[in-house]
Image: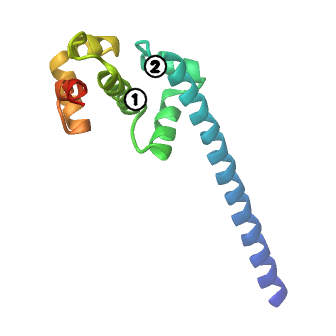
Amino acid sequence: MALEQEMMHAIVHCLAANQADESSNARHHHAALMVRFEETLGKYIDQKLSMPKLCAEVGVAERTLRMCCAEFLGVSPSRYLLLRRLNKARAALRRADPSKATVAEVARNHHFLELGRFSVTYRIAFGELPSVTLQRNSQT
């Protein structure tokens, strides 16, 4: 009886270790996929990037990319791409000369075609209108 119990513990331990290894391998694979995702975004951030093209460039199915983004970033790939573009637009607004640049121009340069939607999304993300960010440069 004791031998059977020890064997059962050994079998359970082996199975648990195997599951941990599989989980670790999957996490490692997902982390490598996220590196490719970041590299792809960096390569195409200044271009309009559709989800099918993004997935093709990363070399992964859309469902897998969505799952990995949720796991590592807590948002969808599209949402993450939007946030990256918003941050680039914010940096451009901060660098811009308010006497020469316009919010519309900066928005278009970052693939935001609907100025009203851009302004609302920007305000939600950063707590101020893009025009305030742009004008702040002339005050400092």
**Residue most toward the front?**
140
* Amino acid type for the residue under numbered disc 1: Arg
Q: Amino acid at mark 2?
A: Ile
- Label 2 secondary element: loop
Residue 139 locus on image (x, y percent)? 20, 29
Residue 76 point in image, percent of width and height:
40, 35
The location of residue 136, given as percent across then percent down, is: 21, 29
Q: Is residue 2 above or below residue 95?
A: below
| Residue 45, disc | 2
Q: Nearer the viewer, residue 20 or 83?
A: 83
Front residue of 31 and 1: 31
**Residue drawn at the location 61% of the way across and 41% of the way down:** 31
Regarding mark 1 in the picture, which secondary structure is present there? helix
Q: Quadrant of the N terminus?
A: bottom right
Quarter of the image that includes the C terminus:
top left
Q: Which residue sits at x=45%, y=43%?
A: 73
The outermost residue toward the bottom is 2
Instruction: Name above or below for residue 76 compared with residue 96.
Output: below
Q: Residues within 10 Å of mark 2 (few under 14, many from 20)?
A: some
Q: Are marks 1 and 2 in contact (CB under 8 Å)?
A: yes
Camera sees residue 1: no
Residue designated by label 1: 84
Residue count near mark 1 (Cα–Cα under 10 Å), binned few <14, some 14–19, many ≥20: some
Q: How many marks?
A: 2
Extreme-left residue of the structure: 116
